[in-house]
Image (cartoon, helix red, strand yellow):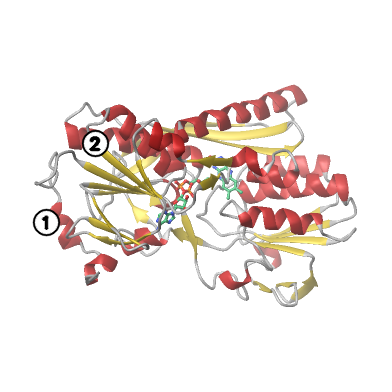
Amino acid sequence: MKISRRLFIGTGVAAATLSAPMVHAAGHGKPRVVVVGGGSGGATAARYIAKDSEGAIDVTLIEPTRTYYTCFFSNLYLGGFKQMNDIGHTYGNLASTYGINVVHDWAIGVDRDAKEIALAGGGRVPYDKLILSPGIDFIEGSVPGWDMSAQNAMPHSYKAGSQTQLLKAQIEAMPQGGVFAMVAPPNPFRCPPGPYERISMVAYYLSQNNPTAKIIVSDPKPKFSKQALFEEGWAKHYSGMIERVDPDFGSENTSVDPGAMTIDIDGSVEKVDVCNVIPAQKAGRIAELAGVTDGNWAPVNPEDMSTKADPDIYVLGDAAQQGDMPKSGFSANSQAKVCANAVRGALTGSRVFPAKFSNTCWSLVFENDGIKVGANYEPADGKIWSTGGFVSQTGEDAALRQATYEESEGWYSGITADMFG
Ligand SMILES: Cc1cc2nc3c(=O)[nH]c(=O)nc-3n(C[C@H](O)[C@H](O)[C@H](O)COP(=O)(O)OP(=O)(O)OC[C@H]3O[C@@H](n4cnc5c(N)ncnc54)[C@H](O)[C@@H]3O)c2cc1C
């Protein structure tokens, strides 16, 4: 296969010449939508377009893995509240019930002139509209001493699956009184409360099985999501176990040595038993290959999630730079529904509703001790803005915290059904 230069880099010129509303390439019947990435954004978008267009649009979903493990609730697996099977989902229903053409392969390039995706397996898939929801990749060199070759010694576990299982096995193998370290990521990153829910769940496991163990968090940020709520829970349930080092104490000067299993925080070197390195993040690489990122994230139009670089390419979820919404599964799912409605309208003339988005991030701090933060959002002036939100309060009673946790379980069932049917 001859791969043109534009296949890998894309250009704004191509975008300008190829864009045309309500048209699809001549010479074939139905309009074709290709979705890259079968996670929170991509699976939802594929399902909604297929379901609502009732066969009027050909939908292809490209996703390399056969089982998608949700990052959401993966911390609960670390804490012992969920099994791995509880967070795994397959694509059979999207194919059999919704007629989606599910292709298990990697997208490795986007030819914006020919409007085709190149697959690692050698195939090419044409599109009229392309939706990218590839999640995140890591920024090389953001944690000195760590690169992807060190992910077995020091797992990131920020893409769920084997990395999550590895981290759990390492926590279980810690010696009594051992040390668990985390290098937390700088903003912006996938799931703002995610590292801190993880700390809570690791602390829960250790409090039950290894109560003299210690947790050190090196955090490059001065503050973090739901901080007062997490810190209240840590003091209440895990007193003396967790030490968080922030920039005032040199956290920005952190490096690791995966061979020696040490972490160096501002010159103070400590031997650790487990080191969870969560590097700085950027959009999944295929967005960069499509030429729709600013180098890190893909700027999008908030009305429909189309990219600023190309009106026929849409980016959802973590990879998008959209404004106020946090990078969460709920956000990606919400954006996918807005995008699906707009894409269907553009291709079939169906009614397009004004964009409205919502998000809630739940976290579990201890058994039945759930907390949440959420908001609604609308587009204005080229970005997505929060129109008002809510957050759990410190000092809430146990019954409310239990109800919040139960709400999160209901949400998990709902969103995974919304993604996979
Ligand atoms: C520990 C942790 C806890 C979290 N907890 C929550 C929570 O409680 N609530 C919540 O809402 N969110 C939570 N999140 C965040 C949530 O998981 C992400 O924000 C969400 O998955 C983003 O959806 P996405 O579609 O952008 O990416 P993903 O869901 O990651 O999907 C991306 C998919 O694209 C595929 N892909 C990537 N590149 C290619 C390619 N080139 N070709 C084909 N396929 C490709 C990948 O295999 C993957 O399946 C959590 C995250 C973490 C790490």
Check the image and name the residue furthest to the front: 96
Q: Amino acid at mark 1?
A: Thr
Mark 2 Cβ and ligand 1 under 8 Å apart: no
| Residue ID at (57%, 32%) | 412
Q: Position of residue 30 (x, y in %)?
A: 18, 38
Please rate how many residues cluster around mark 2, counting C-alpha atoms within 10 Å: few if below 14, some from 14 to 19, many from 20.
Answer: many
Q: Name the element at disc 2.
A: loop
Asked if residue 147 shows in the view, the reply is no
Image quadrant in which the C terminus is located = top left
Q: Amino acid at mark 2?
A: Ile
- Residue pointed to by mark 2: 57
Q: Position of residue 32 (x, y in %)?
A: 23, 43
Q: Position of residue 210 (x, y in %)?
A: 88, 52
- Of residues 50 and 200, the one nearer the viewer is 50
Q: Name the element at disc 1.
A: helix
| Residue ID at (42%, 40%) | 43
Question: Tag count in the figure?
Answer: 2
Q: Earlier in the sequence, mark 1 or mark 2?
A: 1
Question: Which numbered disc covers residue 134?
Answer: none
Q: Position of residue 10 (x, y in %)?
A: 24, 64
- Residue pointed to by mark 1: 17
* Relative vertical location of residue 183 with respect to residue 233 in this rendering, above or below: below
Q: Quadrant of residue 399?
A: top right
Check the image and name the residue furthest to the left: 26
| Residue ID at (71%, 65%) | 249
- Give the Cα separation between the discs numbered 1 and 2: 23 Å
